[in-house]
Amino acid sequence: MVEINPTLDSGNTMAQNAFDILEAATDAIQNRLRMEEVVSR
């Protein structure tokens, strides 16, 4: 994931949005892996 931010906003909104998406995706992947681990037992 790459941020291109030509406006250089002070709050770095695009980076925060990208991080939120990445964090949600990571949580979903981890939950899926946990579910697969439980089912395979």
Image (cartoon, rainbow, N blue to C red):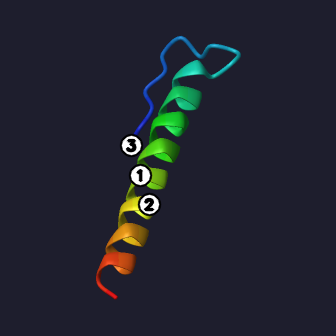
The residues tagged by marks 3 and 1 sit, at their Cα atoms, a distance apart of 17 Å
Q: Earlier in the sequence, mark 3 or mark 1?
A: 3
> Residue lying furthest right in this view?
10
Please name the residue that numbered disc 3 is placed on: 1
Q: Nearer the viewer, residue 38 or 9?
A: 38
Q: Is residue 26 left or right of residue 12?
A: left
Q: Tell which tag, 3 or 1, sits nearer the viewer.
A: 1
Q: Earlier in the sequence, mark 2 or mark 3?
A: 3
**Residue at the spot x=45%, y=32% of the render?**
3
Q: Hey, what amino acid is under mark 2?
A: Asn
Q: Hey, what amino acid is under mark 3?
A: Met
Q: Nearer the viewer, residue 16 or 39?
A: 39
Q: Is residue 23 left or right of residue 34?
A: right
The residues tagged by marks 1 and 2 sit, at their Cα atoms, a distance apart of 5 Å
**Residue at the spot x=59%, y=20% of the render?**
13
Q: Is residue 1 left or right of residue 27?
A: left
In what quadrant of the picture does the C terminus appear?
Answer: bottom left
**Contact between labelled residues 2 and 1, with CB atoms less than 8 Å apart:** yes
Name above or below for residue 27 compared with residue 24: below
The residues tagged by marks 2 and 3 sit, at their Cα atoms, a distance apart of 21 Å
Expressed as whole percent of the image width and height from the top left, the position of residue 26 reads 45, 54
Please name the residue that numbered disc 1 is placed on: 28
Q: Hey, what amino acid is under mark 1?
A: Ala
**Residue at the spot x=59%, y=16% of the render?**
8
In what quadrant of the picture does the N terminus appear?
Answer: top left
Please name the residue that numbered disc 2 is placed on: 31
Q: Tell which tag, 2 or 3, sits nearer the viewer.
A: 2
